[in-house]
């Protein structure tokens, strides 16, 4: 019986897209929530806006790190 | 006939590879670590423009500033008041030159991405962001050691008031997040944003070129409606590319600002007292 | 149809995008170092100097304005003082004038009264002198007339009635004369 010859399909691009897409979901929600809360707090207490902005950027940097790992991973795959 | 280096058969869509967008053969010193390519040229150009802007504004600075000097002063005031004083405080004023140089250099390099005839952000390759992140890493560790001596590492790694067993878990996390993740994300954030922007612009420009010229040429006779539809698509991508240029302008400024303010935040977290 | 962008298939290429190229890293380092050194040695000190100059200029201007303000205040005060002086002077002059006028009035009054008194006295003296003179004259005339009357009486030899009539007639004549 002849073996079935399957045309090999390179799924790497799909994997890359999925890796980055999935990695971006969590940070996207996290950053949205974080910035929203920060703005809420700034509106409530405008005099603490400077400190809040600093903390907000620090938090964004932490959360965004995950998405950036996904970005790097997408290229490394 | 395509005006681009990316060639496609008439009627075919061009296939763009990352290599085509981000591969720059060396101009000088090929094969050595001094390999000087188009990116090196852009770095030197960005450096020249940054220096020219600052020296042009401030070398013959007047007490009553003109428009240009006022604009440059506004940028430096932004760094000084909104970044350094607000984040680090008065003791961070010695970092104003560093952060100012970073901000302007990154901004000029980013704007190369939408400058006609250059069309390549200087930070769209990993080298420049990586080097700037190394600078930030060095500076915030040095600032911490300068402020607290070797106690800085203890402050940074061991949060006070945490029971011993949890420290086994926390210390590695702190170590990785402070000394590895910080510079890595700093570099990748800038690089990824600029690279993504470059890819978006390239796709929009090449799609416009393809829809209006290359693919159109594949349907020469008796395909009036196909040609018309392709032209409409081409015009849409053209408008999209114009909008994308505006978006890239925003991203350029934003990323320069974020890189600078995060550097300031990291320095501040090193300098401030342990709690 | 091919995707518009496909990632580079060989592993080296993928790492090539993520990892910095040594040459670019080197030239980037050179470029940023140049920027940092030149800006921190030239541009930022120059900016600091011009900001100091501006602060000094603004400070100087403000001090100048303050000095001007003090000066103006002093000028106003001296002006007010001089106005007050002038007003006092004027009041004094008016008072003086009033006093002088009062004195003058009193003088004039006194002198007028004195004059009036002296005039009155002189008039009274005149009147009394006149009266004396008239009396004197009357006495003389009465004498002369008496002599004349007596001579007439003597001449005519009159009785008492006639005598009386004559005297009455004469007195009548005198009073109608006078």
Image (tube, grey):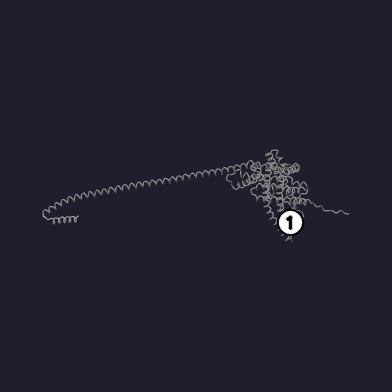
Q: Give the camera-side residue of B180 and B58.
A: B180
Query: Mark 1, residues whose alpha carbon is within 10 Å: few (<14), some, or many (≥20)?
Result: many
Kind of element beneath mark 1: helix
Most extreme residue toward the front is C160
Where does the N terminus of chain C fall, quadrant-wise?
Answer: bottom right
Say left or right for A42 vs B165: left
Rendered location of residue B90, percent (x, y): 63, 42
Q: Residue at position x 73%, y 56% from top?
A: B215
Give the labeled residue for mark 1.
B215
Rendered location of residue B160, percent (x, y): 71, 42
Is residue B49 visible in this depiction of the protein?
no
Q: Number of numbered discs present? A: 1
Picture quadrant of residue C47:
top right
Most extreme residue toward the top is B149
Q: Give the camera-side residue of B245 and B235.
A: B245
Q: Chain of mark 1?
A: B
Rendered location of residue C83, percent (x, y): 45, 46
Where does the C terminus of chain C fall, quadrant-wise?
Answer: bottom left
Most extreme residue toward the right is A1
């Amino acid at each position: 019986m002849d073996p079935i010859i399957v045309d090999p399909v390179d799924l790497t691009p799909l994997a890359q897209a999925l890796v980055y897409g999935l990695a971006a979901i969590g940070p996207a929600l996290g950053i949205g929530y974080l910035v929203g809360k920060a703005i809420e707090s700034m509106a409530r207490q405008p005099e603490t806006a400077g400190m809040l902005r600093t903390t907000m950027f620090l938090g964004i940097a932490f959360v965004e790190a995950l998405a950036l790992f996904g970005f790097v991973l997408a290229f490394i795959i | 006939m395509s005006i681009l280096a990316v060639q496609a058969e008439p009627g075919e869509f061009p296939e763009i590879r990352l290599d085509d967008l981000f591969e720059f053969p060396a101009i000088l010193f090929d094969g050595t670590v001094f390999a000087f390519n188009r990116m090196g040229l852009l770095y030197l150009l960005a450096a020249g423009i940054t220096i020219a802007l600052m020296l042009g504004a401030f070398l013959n600075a007047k007490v009553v500033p003109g428009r240009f000097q006022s604009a440059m002063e506004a940028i430096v005031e932004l760094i000084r008041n909104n970044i350094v004083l607000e984040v680090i405080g008065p003791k961070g004023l010695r970092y104003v030159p560093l952060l100012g140089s970073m901000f302007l250099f990154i901004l000029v390099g980013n704007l190369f991405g939408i400058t006609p005839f250059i069309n390549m952000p200087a930070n769209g390759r990993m080298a420049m962001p990586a080097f700037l992140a190394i600078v930030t890493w060095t500076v915030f560790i040095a600032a911490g050691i300068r402020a607290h001596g070797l106690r800085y590492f203890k402050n940074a790694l061991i949060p006070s008031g945490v029971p011993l067993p949890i420290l086994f878990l926390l210390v590695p996390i702190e170590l990785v997040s402070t000394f590895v993740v910080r510079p890595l994300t700093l570099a990748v954030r800038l690089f990824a944003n600029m690279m993504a922007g470059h890819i978006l612009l390239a796709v929009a420009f090449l799609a416009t070129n393809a829809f209006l010229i290359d693919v159109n040429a594949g349907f020469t006779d008796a395909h009036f409606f196909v040609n018309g539809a392709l032209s409409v698509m081409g015009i849409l991508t053209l408008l999209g590319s114009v909008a994308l240029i505006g978006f890239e302008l925003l991203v350029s400024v934003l990323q320069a600002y974020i890189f600078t303010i995060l550097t300031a935040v990291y320095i501040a977290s090193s300098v401030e007292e342990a709690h | 149809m091919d995707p518009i962008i496909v990632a580079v298939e060989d592993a080296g290429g993928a790492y090539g995008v993520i990892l910095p190229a040594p040459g670019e890293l080197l030239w980037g380092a050179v470029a940023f170092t140049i920027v940092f050194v030149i800006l921190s040695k030239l541009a930022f000190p120059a900016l600091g100097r011009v900001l100091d100059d501006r602060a000094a200029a603004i400070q100087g201007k403000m001090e100048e304005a303050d000095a001007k303000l003090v000066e103006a205040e002093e000028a106003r005060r001296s002006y007010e003082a001089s106005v007050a002086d002038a007003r006092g002077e004027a009041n004094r002059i008016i008072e003086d004038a009033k006093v002088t006028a009062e004195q003058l009035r009193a003088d004039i009054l006194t002198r007028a009264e004195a004059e009036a008194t002296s005039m009155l006295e002189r008039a009274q003296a005149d009147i009394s002198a006149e009266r004396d003179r008239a009396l004197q004259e009357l006495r003389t005339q009465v004498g002369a007339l008496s002599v004349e009357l007596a001579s007439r009486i003597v001449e005519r030899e009159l009785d008492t009635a006639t005598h009386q009539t004559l005297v009455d007639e004469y007195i009548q004549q005198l009073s109608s004369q006078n």
